[in-house]
């Protein structure tokens, strides 16, 4: 039976991660839980520009300093089962080649999917235009760039399982094989929702007189560093200035305060008072949403909570992103929930009352597509995974025993 589980991570293990990844639950089910942290090997810019402030003190973590550390670890733990939270990229295919060489099985974590803008048709039209109009130099540069990004997946280990939430989950690379199986569960946010429902006496969800902004720490989000971008990605004084102007308008119109649900990786204590004295609360987003009158958001994954608690959402379009990917992302989120984002550069002529209407059908479809399929177990995410791993391991052992039983 599977005894050792190892999570592959490309950012340092924080206390929040330790809880989200169900370490205590997996330990209670008899698994030995390890982490392989490859941040320093493949994402050195992340640590050079962002220092996590709430690191976990869990001891069973290998922080790899180089590729040899990764190789030595996998060589000495060949029988573990992996949980891949990374996904193959050009710079880290070394890991997935090793997994194949050592025949180490793993599950690809794809449960926290969000509405994604697919620009492939637009991109192909641009390529065709460039080629037809004789811009040979530009065309060759594009093709060369694509070639540099391409990966030969035949040398990489495909996942044994895909850990999925809603129907429209997005597979990580390496792509699944014909033998890959899906374990249907839900987003990790749904675990928090289940916990809140099970502890109603301690956790009231009665609406109070405030609205909540789902902060994304947008100018400084450390995930931008994983994409090779530098932070801040937008002038913070300009961005927060526009937000505060809109918040002033909302507070005056509805006579309720705007409370900031700070992003889990935000470090506002290290910045000026960007929110101009407004209450900033970190680590309790689900309860803030559950008790709010309505929600303000860009494209935060915490929109899941607003959908689950049937809260009206006003989508806000940040400034200085016109025509960019983030504009499309916010618009796409809003469209999936029957809304259009508001340009926070201008707060005149907004039908605020209309913005607080809920498209019930859109909310139902959003839950089905991006949070949890109907009919899947109402139990913690890692409980579902543990059940499947144990069941499949026992079935495999039973099959092997039957195969090698000697005839009388």
Image: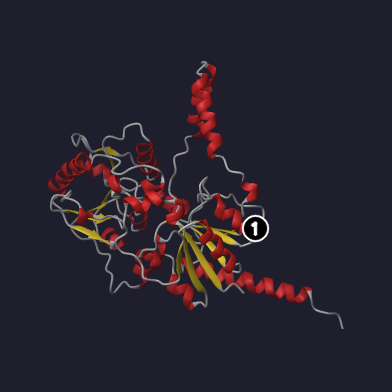
- State the residue at coordinates (14%, 45%): 248
- Looking at the image, which residue sits at the far bottom? 408
Answer with left or right where residue 268 lies relative to residue 186. Answer: left
- State the residue at coordinates (79%, 75%): 404
Q: Position of residue 224 (x, y in %)?
A: 36, 46
Q: Position of residue 384 (x, y in %)?
A: 51, 68
Q: In terms of image quadrants, where is residue 237? A: top left
349 w.r.t. 355: above or below = above
Q: Is residue 303 visible?
A: no
Q: In terms of image quadrants, where is residue 265? A: bottom left
Q: Position of residue 368 (x, y in %)?
A: 47, 53
Look at mark 1 in the image and give the residue it sits on.
101
Quarter of the image that includes the C terminus: bottom right
Mark 1 surroundings: few (<14), some (14-19) or many (≥20) residues within 10 A? few
Front-lying residue, 210 or 20 = 20
Q: Position of residue 274 (x, y in %)?
A: 18, 48
Front-lying residue, 204 or 65 = 65
Helix, strand or loop at mark 1: helix
- State the residue at coordinates (33%, 58%): 309
């Amino acid at each position: 039976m599977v005894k050792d589980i190892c999570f592959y991570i490309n950012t340092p293990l924080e206390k929040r991660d330790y809880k989200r990844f169900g370490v205590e639950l997996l330990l209670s089910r008899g698994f030995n839980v390890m982490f392989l942290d490859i941040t320093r090997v493949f994402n050195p810019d992340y640590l050079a520009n962002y220092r996590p402030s709430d690191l976990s003190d869990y001891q069973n973590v290998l922080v790899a300093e180089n590729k040899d550390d990764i190789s030595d670890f996998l060589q000495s733990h060949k029988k573990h089962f992996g949980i891949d939270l990374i996904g193959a990229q050009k710079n880290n295919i070394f890991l997935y080649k090793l997994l194949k060489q050592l025949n180490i099985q793993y599950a690809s974590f794809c449960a926290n999917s969000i509405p994604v803008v697919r620009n492939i048709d637009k991109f192909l039209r641009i390529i065709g235009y460039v080629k037809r109009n004789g811009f040979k130099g530009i065309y060759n540069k594009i093709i060369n760039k694509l070639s540099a990004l391409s990966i030969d997946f035949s040398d990489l280990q495909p996942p044994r399982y895909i850990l999925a939430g809603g129907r429209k989950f997005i597979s990580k690379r390496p792509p699944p094989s014909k033998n890959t199986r899906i374990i249907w569960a839900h987003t990790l946010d749904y675990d928090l929702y289940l916990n809140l429902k099970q502890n109603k006496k301690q956790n009231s969800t009665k609406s109070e007189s405030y609205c909540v902004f789902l902060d994304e720490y947008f100018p400084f989000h450390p995930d931008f560093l994983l994409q090779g971008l530098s932070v801040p990605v937008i002038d913070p004084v300009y961005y927060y200035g526009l937000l505060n102007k809109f918040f002033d308008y909302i507070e005056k119109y509805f006579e309720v305060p705007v409370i900031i649900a700070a992003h889990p990786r935000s470090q506002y204590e290290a910045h000026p008072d960007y929110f101009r004295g407004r209450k900033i609360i970190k680590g309790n987003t689900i309860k803030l949403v559950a008790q709010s009158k309505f929600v303000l958001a860009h494209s935060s994954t915490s929109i899941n909570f607003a959908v689950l608690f049937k809260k009206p959402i006003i989508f806000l379009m940040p400034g200085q992103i016109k025509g960019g990917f983030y504009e499309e992302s916010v618009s796409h989120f809003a469209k999936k929930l029957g809304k259009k984002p508001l340009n926070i550069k201008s707060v005149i002529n907004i039908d605020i009352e209309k913005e607080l209407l809920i498209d019930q059908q859109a909310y139902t479809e959003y839950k089905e597509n991006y949070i949890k399929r109907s009919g899947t177990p109402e139990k913690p995410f890692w409980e579902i995974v543990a059940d499947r791993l144990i069941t499949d391991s026992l079935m495999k052992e039973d099959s092997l025993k039957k195969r090698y039983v000697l005839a009388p």
